[in-house]
Amino acid sequence: MMIDRNDLERLKRLLAPGGQRIAVVAHTNPDGDAIGSALAWRRLLAGMGHEVCCAVPNRYPAFLGWMTDIGHLRIFREDTDGEVARFIAEADLIFCLDFNQIERLEGMSAAIAANTRARRVLIDHHLNPPAIYDLQFSVPAASSTSFLVYGLIVALAGEKAVDYATAESLYVGMMTDTGNFSFSNLTPELYRAVAVLAERGIDIPAIHNNVYNSFSEGRIRLLGYALNRKMEIMHPYGAAYISLTERDLRRFRFQIGDSEGFVNFPLAIREVSMSAMFLETKNFIRVSLRSRGDVDVNVFARRYFDGGGHRNAAGGKSFLPMPETVERFRAAVEEFFGERSGAE
Ligand code: 5GP
Ligand code: MN
């Protein structure tokens, strides 16, 4: 694991004074890795005797509701009495997990930006972190932030600090961000970490079942509809996209998280190497991008959809209506793949 010795020493020094107020925050629309890494980090810090507030901007998907530590997660948008905002305003330290651009906190960004006194520490695996952190553990080669957090916990406090609940949280993050251990960066070190988690007695088949086999009827019918009726393939480019409007979502009684992972399905088609999903929300269209091999959707998201992410998984936003968003995507695909073939 690529943890810099000097950075680790600086982290130890930052955590040395006891009883600090520490905020641990993860990104909007939190996924398994955001939740898993944040909950595991919170547990370590609380165990050290700090006062910790672990928060995300909006609600987590229902398929993570069973997690042992989920009760320790605060939801900023649902915090009507402003307790989380007050904690953040008075925090001594703020840990940012599984994202690197403060804007990804959406409604929570202002609260983080307003506390100019707190030291900020980044623990993340996304590319291109902005230079706004006092200390950063930014490891794009890590398959998940949870794997990075595992490395930090072991480096700071030893394997013994990984208890059952920590193991469960970290396994959820590692499993979801690697597509159940099937994407890139599956290093021997990752499997050694998983071995330690397994030693803590976590129930891996039950975790798998809770996360992947817990679709609501509406969700599985929406998936069928999305693939059958709303998926288009641009054959010359091996690019596929799915667009879901608010009307589509209402029809299937959409709940937040219901369309999670849909964007991966078109990539199961042999000739598809890039997949996009457009999900209409009240204020904008959320764009999700996935790819295989050297098709770089991080570059694509940055260039055309004001977003970013990783080479094979990225996202962004569109403020145009759905038909124009789709047109923009189609033109972008033609330009992007045109350049690629031109360059070869
Ligand atoms: P998802 O499609 O699951 O929402 O996002 C996949 C990945 O794309 C995320 O892990 C994150 O790295 C990145 N991503 C998604 N939306 C945005 C965005 O609006 N801005 C940036 N910079 N990255 C995003
Ligand atoms: Mn992640």
Image (spheres, rainbow, N blue to C red):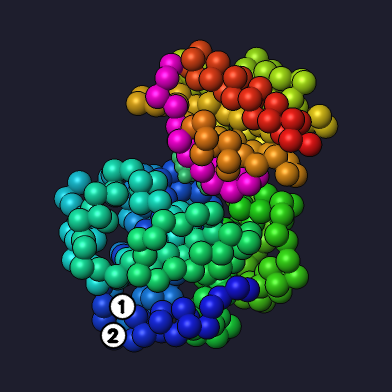
Badge 2 element: loop
Q: Is residue 240 left or right of residue 121?
A: right
Q: Which residues are magenta?
A: 306-321
Residue 117: give x, y in percent of width and height: 20, 68
Q: Which mark is residue 58?
A: none
Sequence-earlier tag: 2 or 1? 2
Q: Is residue 263 visible?
A: yes
Q: Is residue 71 left or right of residue 195?
A: left
Instruction: Read off the residue under disc 2.
Output: 18
Residue at figure coordinates x 43%, y 76% from the top left = 44
- For badge 1, the amino acid type reads His
Residue 10: give x, y in percent of width and height: 40, 82
Q: Assess whether residue 266 is covered by the magenta stretch.
A: no
**232 or 205: nearer the eye?**
232
- Please tell me whether residue 288 is drawn above or below residue 163 in the rendered image: above
Give the position of the N terminus as an image quadrant: bottom right
Give the position of the C terminus as an image quadrant: top right
User: To which quarter of the image does residue 45 belong?
Assistant: bottom left
User: Tag 2: Cα neighbours inside 10 Å, few (<14), some, or many (≥20)?
Assistant: few
Residue at figure coordinates x 25%, y 55% from the top left = 113
Q: Is residue 139 left or right of residue 123?
A: right
**343 or 258: nearer the eye?**
343
Q: Assess whether residue 317 is covered by the magenta stretch.
A: yes
In the image, the residue with mark 1 has its CB under 8 Å from the nearest atom of ligand 2: no
Instruction: Read off the residue under disc 1.
Output: 50
Badge 1 element: loop
Mark 2 vs 1: CB contact within 8 A: yes
**234 or 197: nearer the eye?**
234
Residue 337: give x, y in percent of width and height: 70, 29
